[in-house]
Amino acid sequence: MKLSIKKILTIGKREVMSNIKRKQFLIATIIVPIVIIAFSVIGSMMMFDIKEIKVGYVDEFGVEIPNKVIENNLGKNTTIYFLKYENIEKGKEDVINEKINALIIIPKNYLDTGKIIIYSTTKSPNPLITETLNKLLIKKLLKGKVDNKTYERVINPMNLTIYSLSKKGFEKENFLSQLLPVGFVFLLYMAISSLSGIIVSSVIEEKQNRIMELLLCYSSAENLMFGKILGISIVGLVQIGIWVMVGIPLLLTYAVKISLYTITLAMAYFIMGYLFYSSLLCGLSSLFSHPKDASQLMSPIILIQLLPIMFMNTIMVNPNHYLAKILSYIPFTAPYTVVLRASSTNIPTTDIALSTTIMIISIIISFLLSIKLFKIGVLLYEENMNLKKVLKIIFKA
């Protein structure tokens, strides 16, 4: 296998220039993040920029509900006005006519049953309503039985600070810093899903237009494949870079602290995962002549990545569970699982070493297999390619 760096770079440059002009790339890179941010901002504004809430109530228990309560809603004050009703049906009518946001019914036997009824036009009333009602009920139940300090502690029982302990010492944990690895998992999933689309479109389009044959006159199949992987990887990194830049202001706003260990681990597994999937997808996509046929085989490969996401809660709560360890040793799931485990614990060095070794070996095997498949596939114009035919070609390769 003779590789030409010059030809690989030339092909890579061509891939970059052709792919950044694709509508698919522009949509995934620019429009999708903008839409996500827009919906997030609009959702936050709708949820938290509420100046006042009107709540009707029928109090048969005697809670002593005030006329209004001012609650802090993420730095902004929201005034909740409580309007007393004698007639439940009248209250329901006002809810339907949107004169009040909700109607609360506190039955006479509340102490025995704990039952509270809320009527609202939405399936779930504003959390501020239930939180405020909860405080008022606790105040009623504890009135005359405890002092003010005890009452405040019942309302806010914990001012929690979490420290992560290891042989190296301990450090204060931040809730958002624990969510970052989750963000990384979704970022990698989005990147590889986008990568698969770009690779399949690029290879199949060039086969259909017979451009592939012209490229093979200029370069060998090996140089062509490596050039494609290089170019598409650069396109992918540009895409990811834009997504990360969008997220940096959020990290700075909340002063999220990220350990160097987590960053290094995430970057290492991101690169390994990207190389593994890009080489595998490039080799497999060359066997197809139509996008529809390719999607039938590519979909299961992409869906395998969902396993760590499906078991995310188990992995993060119990990072040394046998399931988490097994997924750390499977090349398709390791890039996700290892980072999720690292967000909850210091992974044993032996686990990291074994997982990394398996990933490196898998990348090498993936490249070697893909080169063989690429040599066969670039000039293969098979109609109705299916899994059985693909497996037959793989075993022959």
Image: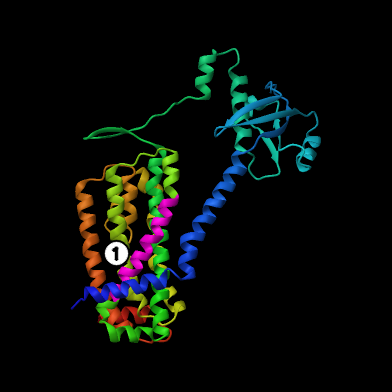
| x and y, in percent, of residue 197 in the image | 43, 69
Q: Quadrant of the C terminus?
A: bottom left
Q: Magenta residues?
A: 225-246
Residue 216 quadrant:
bottom left
Give the side of residue 52 with respect to residue 201, left or right. Answer: right
Q: How packed is label 1: few (under 14 Cα within 10 Å), some, or many (20 or more)?
A: many
Give the side of residue 144 with respect to residue 284, left or right. Answer: right
Residue in front for this viewpoint, 78 or 63 = 78
| x and y, in percent, of residue 259 in the image | 30, 41
> What is the basis of the colouring in this image?
rainbow
Look at the image and say whether residue 231 sits in the magenta stretch. Answer: yes
Residue in front for this viewpoint, 173 or 229 = 229
Residue 358 visible in the current orientation: yes
User: On the image, numbered disc 1 is attached to which residue?
Assistant: 275
Q: Amino acid at mark 1?
A: Leu
| x and y, in percent, of residue 33 in the image | 49, 56
Q: Quadrant of the N terminus?
A: bottom left
Name the magenta segment's main secondary structure: helix
Give the side of residue 54 with respect to residue 323, left or right. Answer: right
Look at the image and say whether residue 133 sits in the magenta stretch. Answer: no
| x and y, in percent, of residue 140 in the image | 62, 20
Residue in front for this viewpoint, 89 or 346 = 346
Q: Residue at x 23, y 56 (%)?
A: 356
Residue in front for this viewpoint, 252 or 369 = 252
